[in-house]
Image (spheres, rainbow, N blue to C red):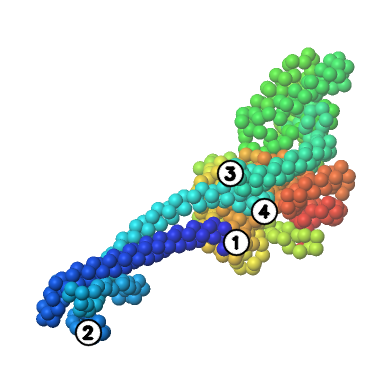
Amino acid sequence: MSLIRQVWLLVLGIIVAGCIGSVGVSLWTAKAYVETQVSLKNNDNAQSLALTLSQLTGDAALVELGVTAQFDTGYYRSIRLKAPDGRVLVERSANASAGSSPAWFARLVPIHPKPGVAQVSSGWTQLGVLEVISHTSYAHDDLWTGAIRTTVLMAALGLIAAACGWWAVSRLRRPLDAVVDQAQALSERRFLQMAVPRTPELRRVAQALNAMVERLRLLFAEQASQVETLRHEAHCDELTGLTHRRQFLAGFEAELGRESGATRGLLLLVRVLALADVNRRLGHAQTDTMLQGLARALSEPVAGVEPHSVGRLNGSDFALLNTSAVEAADWSQALMVRVQAVMSAHADVAVVASLVAAQRGDRVGQVMACADAALARAEVAGAFTMVSELMPSSSPSESGGEDAWRRQLDEALSRRRTRLVSFPVIDARRALIHFESPLRVQLKEGGEFEPAAHWMPFALRTQMMARVDEIAVLLALKAIAEDGAPRCVHVSRQSLRDACFLPRVRSRISAAGEAARQLWIEVSERVLFDDVDPFAEMARQLRPFGVRIGVEHAGVGITSAPGLLEVGLDYVKLSASVIIDVAQEPSRATLVRRTVALLKALSLSVYAEGVQNEADLEMLWQCRIDGVTGPAVRL
């Protein structure tokens, strides 16, 4: 039984006991008072009648007439005159008449007044003893009426007391519920602080929990800072802060091979001409300032579009990957104008650039070779030249327009030309953890089922992702109901921001029964930075159904995400760019091991995406990864 229920029972018990006690005390007090008054009445009537009879000089007829007259005009149960030797001289009696009070009440509260007794005499001669007993039914009626009034009054007071008790318990319950919610949040890996209540006992509990949460936050922040420092040393260029060549290419390869990666991207290479001569002419410090300015110019958004990744390939070469849907010529021209403005602050410093297109499934080496060749031609052409080699796009949006794409996607979704594919996530014993189940859409009837990379950018642009994600959840629940295998689906940031998405999905999941307990839902890492509140709300509403909530495509920077300690995640999937070549690079293995240890300290399961070979797989098991997926994974 809950504490609040026990408090309520205690309050109600006290109120009921108080009411019963008050009615009982009032009733018995009134009973004693009535008995006293009836006894006094009996005695007064007996004395008065005895005085009257004493004046009749012992005339038996007159005495009997006097007794009868008194009996008939009063409310008596009996009047009896006894001779000194005990004989009854005159007696009048009557049965008790039924009053308004119930018989059980008269039995429960009996009234026993003392009979009135007086001496009847004529001069100095005793004629007899007079005994007068009054009826008590009218007294029971008065007691019954008083008892009802008292009960009604006490019931009203009891209701008022119950209302006051409800208010007091509600005030007590709010801080108590807050303490319980905080404890529940801690059990769900959500490290939240609460307002300290005024109640002294609860204040101490809340202060202790808040102190524990703060210590955990500080400890986690310290460890996250160490991991971030290690990440910067392992992945980043010390001067500019950009990722170095190996990490940039690893991220590029992961993006090209990802199921939900961009269909088409733009790779821009920028080279500072004659960097060694520039260093001798400007000096080391000014050259470093120039390179840092160039890095900032490449990293900042252009026309509202942020680059996917930026890296420094070597001393003079920089690379930028853009996976957003932009007009290549306009975007690259705007970027070169910015770069030229930065370079104009330094005398006789020039750059050249190359721009090439990459599509999902391309090999990184081939794309880089094409970009390097274009960059070499740009060097021949002269300062601030950019050479572009862009393949014509075959996307439906460019061939038919956005409206045509919307109609095509809407038709495919309406006619349920959708299916899930399955990629296993396994543990170290090769046991299935769950199937990653990305959605495929058949855009043309009878055609191929296209991966998300082909249609997702346009679904995002046409505000259809909530509908797409809802279908993916439904298909996953249906597949789980058929074979019982756990399945994982991705939910986009656009769906989280849609106010109608969560209620619809929650309704579907609640109707799925046990199948919901095998459903996994994950979002991209960026959600923990930009959409914490809607993500936390989704986790709060879906977790009671047994749904597991996680983050995919996570870099080691997830340890600094503000939402990591607030949402209550169940698992994290590290991106392929984090774990690629982990067997060949000790520094990368150390970084993965530290990241896994930090996440496991929060009771999170940690999985790895895009595992390419057995060597990396074995090293990941040594790093205490809980599960893996990718080309090297087989059930």
Residue position for label 2: 88
The residue depicted at 76 percent of the width and 51 percent of the height is: 600
Residue position for label 3: 197
Residue position for label 1: 516
Foreground disc of the pair 2, 1: 2
Mark-to-mark CA distance, 2 and 1: 95 Å
Foreground disc of the pair 1, 4: 4
Residue count near mark 1 (Cα–Cα under 10 Å), binned few <14, some 14–19, many ≥20: many
**Numbered badge on residue 187:** 4
Mark-to-mark CA distance, 3 and 4: 21 Å
- Rendered location of residue 614, percent (x, y): 84, 55
In depth, the one of 444 and 213 nearer the eye is: 213
Which element type, helix, strand or loop, lies under badge 4?
Answer: helix
Q: Is residue 331 left or right of residue 102?
A: right
Q: Is residue 360 left or right of residue 463?
A: right
Which element type, helix, strand or loop, lies under badge 2?
Answer: strand
- Rendered location of residue 631, percent (x, y): 77, 55
- Label whose residue precedes the other's in the sequence (3 or 4): 4
Which residue type carries mark 4? Ser
Q: Quadrant of the N terminus?
A: bottom right
In depth, the one of 281 and 412 nearer the eye is: 281
Whether label 3 touches label 4, CB < 8 Å: no
